[in-house]
Image (cartoon, helix red, strand yellow):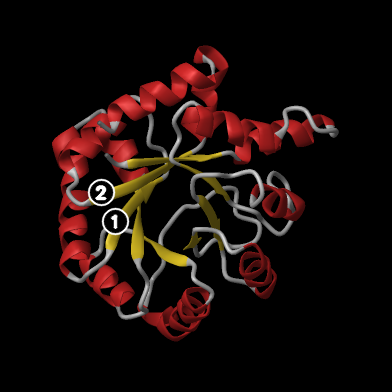
Amino acid sequence: MVKLSVNINKIATLRNARGGDNPNVEQFAEDCEHFGADGITVHPRPDERHIRRDDVIALKNYVRTELNIEGYPSPQFMELVLMVKPTQVTLVPDAPDALTSSAGWEVEPNLEMLTEVVDRLKEAGIRTSIFVGTNEDNIRMAARTGTDRVELYTEPYAREYKEDPAAAVAPFAQAAEVAHKVGLGVNAGHDLSLDNLKYFKENVPHLLEVSIGHALISDCIYMGIEQTIKAYRDCLK
């Protein structure tokens, strides 16, 4: 079964809106795991507008499944992840002030830097994933960094899904085949939801993990945590 990693950034956003510790980030992570999530994802940003450095450190002691930390490999980010040593680090090319991820890496011009970062993470025993689009040459170039996986940026799929599901998913199916052929595991994330997840899973081969945040947290408001996690897991069966 494809693993479901829940991105809990939005829980921290809600907490930060009023200060204090409600909702509690660590408790929410534990609840997601209790109801069947296979992992927890966080994306700490330099301005700490949602997940904070202290949250990441605390989550290491709470998460019993897999902790995935996303981020741009700045010196501060690398210091944090090498201290926490999560199961996986997903490298994204976001600028510090980016609202959310909006593109994958152009790997070739960043090959030397990414290779050095991947080497440091793997020396620490951390699984690595590089956030990419569906360009096949880019995926092949990612394999040259030594990364374990790529994460396919699925916003274009989500945007085009309602108009033509088959056309929307086709580049991702092909990209996954290419990744598999060059020895990379395949993750996916961004704007996946209950509307489009099942079709994506059924049509993209070699898929290991999806990371879902905004849609899933929004569904929790209406459905509750338990039923939401169940619904997403049902899409991945």
Q: Tell me if 95 is positioned left or right of 148 in this view.
A: right
Residue shown at 54%/74% (left/top)? 124
Mark closest to the chain's N terminus, 1 or 2:
1
Quadrant containing the C terminus in the rendered view: top left
Measured as percent of width and height from the top left, residue 215 is found at 47, 30
Q: Tell me if 190 is positioned left or right of 24 in this view.
A: left
Q: Quadrant of residue 77?
A: bottom right
Query: Are there few (<14), some (14-19), or many (20+) residues within 10 Å of tag 1?
Result: many
Q: Are marks 1 and 2 in contact (CB under 8 Å)?
A: yes
Residue shown at 31%/80% (left/top)? 144
| Residue, disc 1 | 186
Q: Secondary structure at mark 1?
A: strand
Q: Tell me if 48 is positioned left or right of 190 in this view.
A: right
Of all residues, the one furthest to the right in this rendering is 20
Residue shown at 26%/33% (left/top)? 161
Q: Secondary structure at mark 2?
A: strand
Q: Quadrant of residue 13?
A: top right
Q: Is residue 31 above or below residue 96?
A: above
Mark linked to residue 54? none
Residue shown at 46%/75% (left/top)? 122
Quadrant containing the N terminus in the rendered view: top left
Measured as percent of width and height from the top left, residue 113 is found at 49, 82
Q: CA distance from mark 1 to mark 2?
A: 5 Å
Measured as percent of width and height from the top left, residue 164 is found at 18, 33
Q: Is residue 216 above or below residue 122?
A: above
| Residue, disc 2 | 207
Which of 32 and 99 lies nearest the eye of the viewer? 32
Which of 131 and 102 lies nearest the eye of the viewer? 131
Residue type (three-letter) at the residue carrying disc 1: Val
Residue type (three-letter) at the residue carrying disc 2: Leu
Measured as percent of width and height from the top left, residue 85 is found at 59, 64
Which of 87 and 178 lies nearest the eye of the viewer? 87
